[in-house]
Each structure stands twice: as C-alpha cells, then as structure tokens.
Amino acid sequence: MNTNEMPLPDNDLSAYRVFSREEWAVLRADTPLTLTVEDLVKLQSVNDPISIEEVIAIYLPLSRLLSLYVAATQGLFKATQRFLMAEDGKVPYVIGLAGSVSAGKSTTARVLRALLSRWPNTPKVELITTDGFLYPNKVLEAEGLMDRKGFPESYDGATLMRFLSEVKAGKAHVEAPVYSHLVYDVVPDEHISVDRPDILIVEGLNVLLPGRNPKAGPGVPVVSDFFDFSIYLHAEENQLERWYIERFMRLRQTAFRDPRSYFRKYAELSDEIAMATAKGIWDRINLPNLHENILPTRARAGLILTKGASHRIEQVALRKL
C-alpha cells in the first residue's frame, strides 16, 4: 500500500488518537454555531466546497479544542511573567497549517480564523500565507527555479524566520509581504501588518519541514519552532490530483480570463489540451513536491485532518500529549 494512502493506526504504539467523523463531532459539546451559510460562501476557495454540517461536525470541535489550548497557554505565559517580574506583554498563539496544493488549506484557514475570533479570549485572529515569502518571479527565473515554485528553495526563508521571530516576541506592526495569485508573483511594495494578535494562523505547503541536523554547532531554527499547534490537511494522492485539475479547469472560465492573469494563455485552450496541461503541471511540479517535502511532514503535525473524495473530513487524528 502506498504510504500516501495508509490509515493512521489507533493503538498504544501510535503517537495519535484517531477519531471517526462521528466520534469527533460529539466533542463539539455545547459550542454554539457562529457562522452562517452566507459566511461560508465568502470563506471557501474555488473548488473547495464546505457546508454548515462540516463546520458543525469538524470545525466547531476543533475551535473548542484550540480555545482551551490557547487559554492554557495564556495562563502559562502570565504565570511566567509574574515569576520573572516582567512587564505585561502579549505573545500570539501561533497555529501552523500544512498540506498539499489543492487540499483546501485556504478554506480551512479562513474558517478557523472566523470561528476562533468569536471566542471571548481570542477576539483578534490574523492569517498569513507563506506565499508572500516566495522569492519574486524575476529571482526565481534568474536562478532557474520557476518550475520549483513552492519547493523549499523557492522561499525567502530568512525573511520568513525574521517575521515569525518578531511576531512571537510580541512586537507590534510586523509586516509580511503580499502575494497575488492573479499575477502569480509577490506584489512589490505591498505588505500586511500583523499587530500582536491573540492567534496567528500560518498557512503554507512546507511549514512543517524539520531542520537539518548540523554536524557541528547549534541547530538552525525552522518555521515550525514558532508554532504552538500544527495541523496537516491530508487527502489521497489521486484525489488531490483530481481536485487540482478540476480547479484549473474552473479557473479557465473565471480568473484566467482576466487580462492581468499570469495564466491568461491557458484560458483559450481546448478542454482536452487544458486538462493535459493541468496534469502535466501536477506531475512535473506539485506531485514531486508532495512526495519530497510535504507528505513526509504529516507525522510532525499536532492534528491530522483526512479528507474523503467529496472534500468531507472523514478522520481526525490528534497527537497524544
């Protein structure tokens, strides 16, 4: 069996406690539903359907769990501040969200942000994607890395690490670069400001990559060192490919038709050629990145959400404390 398709074991030797969809849904307890159908329409990405039932069964229990984790961390931080006789400060709780292209990370991140911001102890929840920390296209082109976009070497790791370090230190108004999926590039001189939120969600393909063990000297920090909790959004390889191609075909009728779109050239292709093009991109870029860099990090996540063919979360695996 392909490791991509292997279910997680639920036994004493596993690092995870595994829940079926129905078992997980019970853990919602009395958490109120705070999103409407209209809210979900605004939050979901292209070709990533999500229903109110999905929010109730999966995301309400998850928001309840995270609210408990955040409250406990906030209490620990205050106790530490008292012990150190330090001035009151505010350090965000950072959640990392990883997974393949087309897994639905953007929708998951936005739904979590909306739910968590409605808890009384975390009214300020912000979200950034690591896309903004990709090198600009001109740099990738000069280095021959355009076909490696999304691979670890295509990111400005130093800038990303500096950003997370400043956020985790409680610094106000930390700026992150902005990425445009329309022009497929970092937007020059445009930034978003992260101003000491209660929670920061960091979404990206490779955010759970481990560091390399140095032969000598101190280890180099990695992105996940700054996370208080991490989530991996998983689906079988054939489903991810199908969703990617379906999204590509749908975008040909919408965003790709914008004259400013980097992908404008694909809008006028025949359906047959467009599907072959999408599959070629998947096989040449996204699939190798999944095999080499993304899927191997699944076991590092605190929580694994596994999707079925209809985009529904069918299994939840929570790392044992």
Image (tube, grey):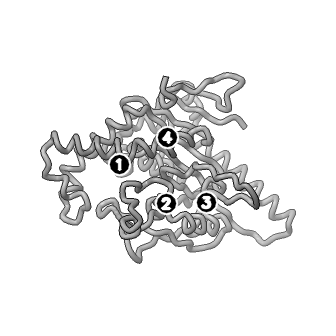
Determine crowd level at label 2: few under 14, some 14-19, many 20+ residues with C-alpha closer than 10 A: some
Which residue is labeled 1 in the image?
A: 45
Which amino acid, by three-letter code, is at mark 3? Asp
Which residue is labeled 2 in the image?
A: 128
Which badge, 4 or 3, comes first in the chain's sequence?
3
Mark pair 1, 2: CA separation? 15 Å
Which badge, 1 or 3, comes first in the chain's sequence?
1
Which badge, 4 or 2, comes first in the chain's sequence?
2
Q: Residue at x 41, y 54 (%)?
A: 148
Instruction: Please tell me which residue lies in front, 54 or 272.
Output: 272
Q: Are marks 1 and 2 in contact (CB under 8 Å)?
A: no
Q: Position of residue 121 (x, y in %)?
A: 63, 55
Mark pair 1, 4: CA separation? 15 Å
Asked whether the viewer can see residue 293, the reply is: yes
Q: Position of residue 222 (x, y in %)?
A: 63, 57
Asked whether the viewer can see residue 35, the reply is: no
Which residue is labeled 4 in the image?
A: 233
Which amino acid, by three-letter code, is at mark 1? Ser
